[in-house]
Amino acid sequence: MVEAFAVASGKGGTGKTTTTLALGMALARRYDVTVVDADTGMANLLFHAGLADAPVTLQDLLAPDASGPDGAAVDVADATYERHGMRVVPCGTSLAAFERSDPARLREVVAELAADTDVLLLDSPATLASKSAVLPIVLADRVVVVTQPTIPALSDALKVQEYAASYGTGIAGVLFNKVRGDLGSVGDQAERYFEGSTLGSVPDSDAARAARDAGEPLLAHAPDSDAAAAYRAAAAGIDPEPKAAGDVADRFRSAVVPERP
Amino acid sequence: MTGEPDAHAAAPIRERLPDGDLVGARVAADFAAPLARALDDRLTGYLRLEPGDALLGVGGSEAVITVESGVPVLAYDAGNAGADADDADGPAALAALAGTTPVRVERYRLPAEALASLHDTEVEGSDPFRVAPGAPARELAGDDALAERTREAAPAERRDAAGDHDALAAFLADEERVEAVRREARAEARARAEEWDLGDQLAE
């Protein structure tokens, strides 16, 4: 079985990468989880996951000849790292490699990963302004919408939902992140407008910043923090639906080709 | 303070704000620049904001955010003459203003004592107008760093003002407004799908 989730926010700065890794680690207690940095233009998952020195990343797989830094041929397994109970596929940050990369190859990489996991989490770009940024939302089964409790962030979260609905992609739920104080009635009010449930409210936390600086996912760095507990509770509200791995892989394989960046 | 508040003190803030000296005016693409400018200049006075729809002659709305040493204190929105929206105060004024860029911003300076009575937390009638120091930067500009910088610049007693989510609650209570955001996003999604050759991926 496999279900592909895009973790998306529309707006930057909502803590999407922290969220992707936290949900991944929490879900990894029950499922085989693979996390992919699909934000190839502004990759930062590698820093959060302690993979800044990873010798081979998604960027190498997206190169036309799929070769690593030393020129040797690489495949998906070479860019997949076992970390914190899950598989992590980071993306590099080299501008030259980004310019050389062929985004169409992302479909093949994700299709291959989908064949061998239960839950696929795609850390999506923080924008809806380009075809490749929207692609994870187009291809995923459902979207986990991450938002801060502010008007601009929630407006963008609503936009993500409408983009998802336009492509027939479901909503797994809405997660409020970086919350100061009590959310009050906002969670209930928001639920009226979103398809999925409100997955939870993660408090604004110095622990999340410290985890990022330490190159560790929050759930590994500060497992006893309030924020970590909130993420675990949110993950419990996501119930992956079994799908035939082949169908999901085929969907990615036959997906539209994004424009060159 | 003892006895009945006098009639003057109980009058709405918008009727009691004295006219300040205009120190600058410009049309801004977003709210971050004028809010940052007020903070950097430690402006005491108010920002008079005329949102895009008013600039285009559609409505007649204007809003005011008072500032003390660059930190927002009170806000009101005089509604939109073109629609049936009512005046809004405090967090609801921020909700009404959100997303209305471009915005014409006029900066007015006032002597601190001219604002002292309006900004006094003990003054009758000022409470509904009050906003958290970082709320305009967060709710109008979506700028966390500026919001934090503003909060830190606020006097200690205002730094941890409650009501962080009041503006969002006011926004979510306005069903028509939320539906308008969703409707525009749906139209945008479909238009862009065609533009990006994703038309055949669209759901029925």
Image: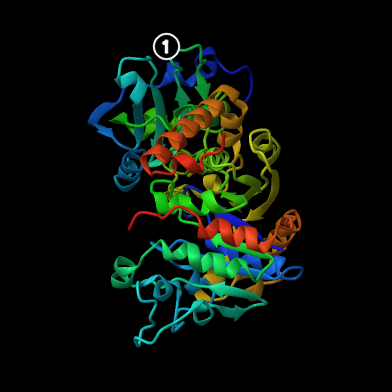
Could you tell me how many numbered marks the image carries?
Answer: 1
Compare residues A104 and A50 and report the one nearer the observer: A104
Q: Please determine whether, in this image, residue A64 is positioned above or below residue A19.
A: below
> Looking at the image, can residue B184 be seen?
yes
Instruction: Say which quadrant the N terminus of chain A sits in.
Output: bottom right
Q: Position of residue B126 (x, y in %)?
A: 54, 26
Compare residues A246 and A70 and report the one nearer the observer: A246
Label 1 resides on the chain identified as B
Lateral position of residue B58 relative to residue A119, left or right? left
> Looking at the image, can residue A206 be seen?
no
Lateral position of residue B202 relative to residue A69, left or right? right
Compare residues B42 and A39 and report the one nearer the observer: A39
Residue located 63% across and 24% down the image: B2
Residue located 44% across and 32% down the image: B116
Residue count near mark 1 (Cα–Cα under 10 Å), binned few <14, some 14–19, many ≥20: few
Lateral position of residue A18 relative to residue B44, left or right? right
Q: Position of residue B38 (x, y in %)?
A: 33, 41
Residue located 40% across and 22% down the image: B17
Residue underneath mark 1: B82
Q: Position of residue B199 (x, y in %)?
A: 45, 39
Dot 1 falls on a residue whose secondary structure is loop
Report the amino acid beneath label 1: Gly
Q: Please determine whether, in this image, residue A72 is positioned above or below residue A159.
A: below
Q: Please determine whether, in this image, residue B42 is positioned above or below residue A222.
A: above
